Amino acid sequence: MGEARIRKRKPVRHKQMRDVERELSEAMGLKVDMSSGFIELAHFEGNDILILDRELIAMRIEISGAMSWVPTLRGILKWEPERSWAAVDKGAIPFLMNGADCMGAGIHIADPAIPSGGFVWIRDQDAGKPLALGIALVNGEDMMEMTKGKAISTLHHIGDELWNVET
């Protein structure tokens, strides 16, 4: 098997990205403006990806049956959104770094507005740094109450192929 790499990379104009900016803004609850950057669309492991100034900052995934643009972890680091997050304790981190789904018992606080089936990013409870992201299997309120079972289906984590890919 070959090394995972970016394919079909092509520059795009900012005006073609307005819908993408809107979807990213909705996912994170903040205004995304890429007008000053060099934007490229590409494919990685079967997903559409967005590269801004040589940084892989967004990907297109299926959320509740529809394709949507969401930030990658590098996008989260860049934009620092204040919503759609769940915070986990130290015990959960090694599992997340191996690509495991996030268990409800490890989540201590979460954005209560996260809908079941919605985009969510996972952060370290102490440092606040992003660790992983995925799709919520329950809503934000329920995540905080759970003592067993999976709360988030993990799609991307620090150290995975998407994180390590050369741009």
Image: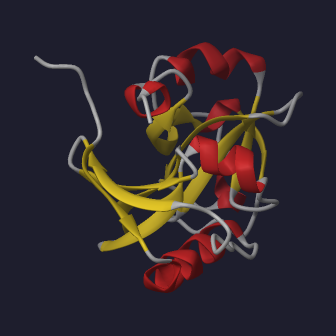
Which residue occupies the extreme left position in the image? 1
Residues 44 and 127: in front is 44
> In the figure, is residue 153 to the left or right of 144?
left
The residue depicted at 64 percent of the width and 75 percent of the height is 35
Where is residue 55 shown, x and y percent of the image? 55, 44
Q: In the image, what residue occupies the spot 82% across and 60% down? A: 82
State the image coordinates of residue 53 (x, y, percent, origin top left): 58, 51
Instruction: Locate residue 36, reporting x and y percent.
Output: 68, 69
Q: Residue at x 46, y 39 (%)?
A: 154
Is residue 59 placed above or below 113 in the rendered structure?
above
**Compared to 24, does 71 lie above or below?**
above
Image spot of residue 62 (x, y percent): 33, 64
Visible in this render: residue 98? yes
Quarter occupied by residue 160: top left
Residue drawn at the location 53% of the way across and 45% of the way down: 54
Can residue 117 be spotted in the picture? Answer: no
Q: Horizontally, is 119 left or right of 64 in the view?
A: right
Of the pair 71 and 102, the residue shown nearer to us: 71
The number of callouts visible is: 0
